[in-house]
Amino acid sequence: MKKNIPFVDLYPQYKECKNDIDQAIRNVIARSDFITGPTVENFEQAICDYTGAEACASIGSGTNALTCALKALDIGTGDTVWTVGHTFVSTTEAIVNVDARPEFVDIDKYYHLDLDQIPEFDENCPPAAILFVDLYGQTPDIDKFKKFANKYKIKLIEDAAQSFGAEYKGKKVGSLVDLTCFSFNPVKNLGAMGDAGAVTGPRKLIDKVKMYRDHGRKTKFEYDKVGYNARIDNLQALIVQAKLKKIDGWLEKKRQICRRYTDELHNIVKCPVEAPWGKHSYYVYVIETPKGTRDKLQKFLKEKGISTNIHYKFPTHRTKAFTDGSRLSRTEYICKNILSLPCYHTLTKNNQSYIIESIKEFYEN
Ligand SMILES: *Cc1c(COP(=O)(O)O)cnc(C)c1O
């Protein structure tokens, strides 16, 4: 019997937090207090409590979190930032929007920026920053990045849009490098009901991020920097905060679902590898299909009523806005062969079995 399995399913999250979310929305409307103030400060403290970060600046989106983080670290005109092409476009977009120059680096088996494949560079003039991505929900080997960055005084920015709740060597993502940027886009591990994000890190830098998110203000009418309007809505802050109570349970369920996929499918397709140094948060579960089969598999699954996705179909450096002639062989190869399977915490055992059996059926015929 044909099923209808969506790729994401957000409504059950609301149902699990309904009382808190409904109450929060009523309170915001009753107070008619929609941006800034104690609601936001309270939310930022909750993010600090969860991640262990010293300070947090809530932001209107993950993309703006990246932009404000780069600005707070004084990255701008004339600076080079090493990053990956295998990511969501925001990573590159933020670098270009602060007038810095992205230089693309290929990825390793975990889909992370590969420090063993960095471009040749003048040791007297290293890149200003490395903006690496915790792609699919796990961090790279951060100590390796830190060692390299310390040697050349390079700033480290973590695009943790996909890794809220993940851990590195027993520590939560959020205070591992200079600045960490989160997205609370509805589909992320911890999602708002609209756009939202945050930057975490040491207080001094976070104070700078807070200036940039709010028109570069020092006080109401003193503009010390050219900033942005990149603030979070109180409504979104409270919705994210309500869901925060549930996140550990959700992530644990996701991990179990993802491990079952790996157990069942590792002989047929290439499954994600959990790095020995951390705890994966499985924002998405991405398989690598045998060469030349991805599109056919996706079509086959669609006919079976299973929605899948591709993270991502084109590397940033191969899209019109950012083309720069880079050649990244692994990045370009995997973009053609990856497929993301549904892995939300409310995916039923039956539906997961159906997905697994359908993939087996495809490759056995
Ligand atoms: C989602 C995402 C972003 C952007 O977050 P928004 O909140 O949608 O602006 C940035 N980087 C990565 C890797 C993402 O997955």
Image (cartoon, rainbow, N blue to C red):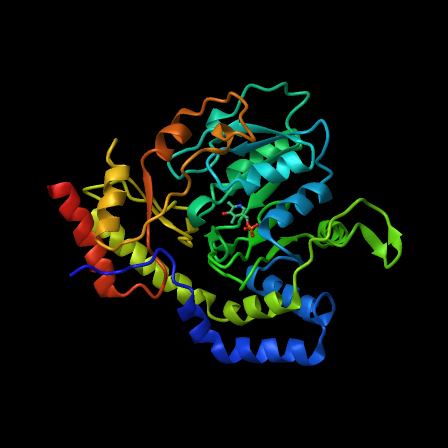
* Percent x, y of residue 15: 43, 75
* Percent x, y of residue 152: 64, 29
Using residue 21 as the reference point, say whether residue 275 is left or right of it.
left
Instruction: Specify the farthest residue to the right.
Output: 221
Rendered residue at 45%/44% (across/down): 135
Using residue 62 as the reference point, say whether residue 289 is left or right of it.
left
For residue 83, say whether it is visible.
Answer: yes
Nearest the camera: 127 or 221? Answer: 221
Nearest the camera: 186 or 132? Answer: 186
Rendered residue at 59%/77% (across/down): 24
Nearest the camera: 97 or 243? Answer: 97
For residue 175, say whether it is visible.
Answer: no
**Does residue 238 lie above or below 276 as drawn?**
below
Q: Quadrant of the N terminus?
A: bottom left
* Percent x, y of residue 294: 27, 38
**Does residue 122 lie above or below 245 as drawn?**
above
Rendered residue at 33%/55% (across/down): 342
Using residue 267 as the reference point, say whether residue 56 is left or right of it.
right
Nearest the camera: 174 or 219? Answer: 219
Q: What number of labels is visible?
A: 0
User: Within the image, what quadrant is residue 338 found in?
Assistant: top left
**Does residue 345 lie above or below 112 as drawn?**
below
* Percent x, y of residue 78: 71, 26
Using residue 308 as the reference point, say whether residue 10 is left or right of it.
right
Q: Quadrant of the C terminus?
A: top left
